[in-house]
Image (tube, rainbow, N blue to C red):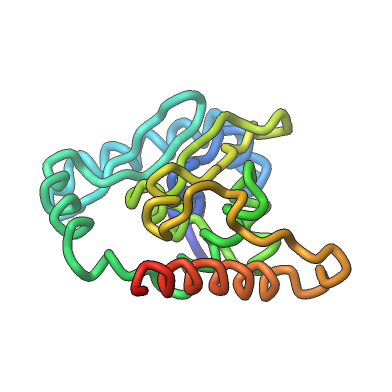
Amino acid sequence: MLSNQAKIESLLFISGNEGITLTELSQITGILKPALHEQLDKLADKYKQDRSSSLQLIHAEERYKLVTKPALAELVKKYLNSNNITELTGAALETLAIIAYKQPITRIGVDEIRGVQSSSMIQRLQLLELIKENGRLDAPGRPILYVTTDKFLDYFGLESLDQLPELDEEKQEDEEMDLMTLFEQTTSSTEDEEEE
């Protein structure tokens, strides 16, 4: 059976860049807040003392999140600047298309459309500066809202979001597919124009 610390750690990991509140942790795990505080302190100490771990636990704006240790900043930056990251994966493009068409949108909103968890894709797109945070939704947990950036427009050779074709409201049954098809059509036509 999994320990309470393992449960907490898994939720911290899956919450990604948004992090998770003590209230959310308590509601999901059924662990009382005083016990959660104790487990979070132990987890933070574990990461501090374990020199072989790349992670640390931070607490900011009532949210807890796992991040890489500052000593690894150069390594992470090197990876992000490598050729391996310049090509967007299908999952990253899918996430980006949803945000482009539905912005501002929360991670949960993206998850609902994709049908899978999107934290890692959102983190990657933020690190590439293709999306950014744009306030918080006035709802329980105050989830972060995401929008595309000017770099997104530059990356795909668009002058404005107006160049993305409008969605056909009658064909919204397979929303994810419609978004991807439209997005790919727009970006490929822009690339063709650049080649000419």
Point 72% across, 33% down: residue? 140
* Image spot of residue 23 (x, y percent): 62, 33
Say left or right for 123 vs 106.
left
Image position, residue 75 (x, y; %): 12, 53
Of residues 65 and 195, which is closer to you in this image? 195
Up/down of 66 relative to 174, above or below: above
Asked which quadrant contains residue 84, the reply is bottom left
Between residue 66 and residue 3, name the one nearer to us. 66
Q: Residue furthest front?
A: 196
The answer to whether 77 is drawn above or below residue 58 in the figure is below
- In the picture, measured across the screen, residue 42 lies left or right of residue 21, that is left
The C terminus: image quadrant = bottom left
| Nearer to me, 18 or 43 | 18
Q: Residue at x 57, y 37 (%)?
A: 144
What is the residue that sits farthest to the right in this orientation? 170
| On screen, residue 28 above or below 98 | above
Q: Position of residue 135 (x, y in %)?
A: 57, 29
Q: In percent of the image, x 44 and y 33: which residue is there?
A: 38
Residue 139 appearing in the image:
yes
Q: How many marks?
A: 0
